[in-house]
Image: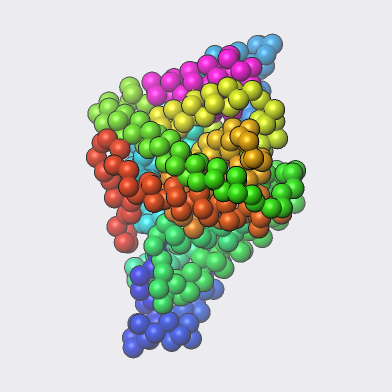
Amino acid sequence: MHAPPDPPAAAPAGAATDPLAILRSKGYLRILVLSGVIGVPVSIVAYGFLALVAWLQDYLFTELPGVLGFAEVPIWWPAPLLALSGLLVALSIRYLPGTSGHPPSEGFKAGGFPQPRELAGVALAALATLALGAVLGPEAPLIALGGGLGALAILLVKKDSPPTAVAVIASAGSFAAVSTLLGSPLLGAFLLMEASGLGGAMLGVGLLPGLLAAGIGSLVFVGLDSWTGLGTFSLAIPNLPSFSTPTVAMFLWALALGVVCPFVAWGIKALARTVRPSVRSHRLIVTPLLGLLVAGLAIVFAQVTGEDTAQVLFSGQDTLPALVTDGASWPLGAVALLVVCKSLAYGLSLSGFRGGPVFPAMFIGAAIGVAASHLPGMALVPALGVGIGAMCVSMLRLPLTSVLLATVLLTSDAYAVMPLVIVTVVVAHVLTGRLPEPPGRAVGRRLPAIGPKSP
């Protein structure tokens, strides 16, 4: 996604600093129409991408062993798949144009967009990462693909389109691609808006094309779900118990988790940054080895707890509802082991694979919340909200988005939980800012204003 710093080139010359004049201009109306049109094909591509990822995950991890003659899925089965994932990602980054998306160890990014020739690398590396079990989410590849496709579309229509117009349409493509992934097009819009730093008097001008594309994209997702029956691929936590009133004890525990989660996130980032130089120096060897380590963590967890390796593998988007439903009945040691194994697998995946950091952070936060629900005076629903909010802001450094992620997912309980989430997010955000940088080279969070990604 790219935040447009200037108005579309078609706006009147004297209206450059007047948002109302820009809104009234014919050029801006054309941008809005084009954004709405672009939202349709981009959301179709995003839906197809997510459907392909879901099908590959199911086939490779549940059906393929039976096809190969195994009576049941061997406990070692994730190992060759994760090694293959690392190899495919490494080959994509090494030999395809561009960098196959931005390295997730550099943090969540919403600036810039890939050039058309780089889209294949982004798609292949993301498929290899997401479908074969690495612990990263689909949001970053979708944002990159949506932005790249949006920019490609406007350049096909008019090759000499001004950079600001290309940037606005690329932004709209990113909005459309993630329109329902987080459960609401508004939540995706807040994520992109906060990560890009879009604000000020031009906020409405820059945001409207993206919101329009996101709304249309959401409708396309719903329509495709009705037509195909594959689902909308949006995050949701159903069947939560009701919660009405926060207590003093819950506020105190919210403060405590706001202190704990930044240290967990710091450790994840430190692991990723420590491993990253070895990945860059010997990518074709180290990345498959990282895949084997991620698989090993999942196997250890499954052997010790008797639960599925999928709890450690993948982004956590699909397993989060089951964790919330069943995890409260797990032994506390099993939940703690899940937090440790998922965190280590997350850090290793950040260092060498390609994907987004949002969903694993949410899952780890939810697991911490499940563990915290055993504390005296704490309940499951507020513990989930507090854990997700604190962990997301510690990893992403996006406080508004973290509050919304933690509350919107809790549906009817959101209003009652929000004060607790705000407290823990503020504490975690301030503490994260005061912690020393993890070891390794500090990397800027944003890409260049217009044009291709930084390497």
| Residue 391 visible, this orientation | no
Q: Position of residue 409 (x, y in %)?
A: 63, 50
**Nearer to me, 446 or 126:** 446
Q: Is residue 85 left or right of residue 434?
A: right
Q: Looking at the picture, does residue 130 appear above or below residue 143?
A: above
The number of discs equals 0
The image quadrant of residue 9 is bottom left
Q: How is the image coloured?
A: rainbow
Work out whether 420 lies above or below 69. below
Residue in the picture at 51% in, 79% down: 29
Magenta stretch encompasses residue 227: no
- Using the image as rendered, state which of residue 48 and residue 313 is in the foreground: 313
> Who is closer to the viewer here, 445 or 414?
414
Image position of 155 with respect to 424: above or below: below
Decide whether residue 298 is among the magenta residues: yes
Range shown magenta: 288-313
- Left or right: residue 12 versus residue 66 is left
Q: Is residue 213 shown above or below 290?
A: below
Taking the spot 58% from the left edge, 14% from the top edge, the residue there is: 303
**The N terminus sits in image quarter:** bottom left
Residue at the front extreme of this rendering: 248
**Would you say the magenta stretch is mainly helix, strand or loop?**
helix
Q: Quadrant of the C terminus?
A: top left
Give the residue displayed 42% in from the left and 41% down from the top: 262
The spot of residue 317 in percent (x, y) is: 59, 40
Q: Which residue is rendered at x = 32% and y = 61% of the image?
A: 450
Where residue 27 appears, as percent x and y from the top left, is 45, 80
What x and y, as percent, mark residue 213?
55, 64
Q: Does any portion of residue 427 appear in the rendered image?
A: yes
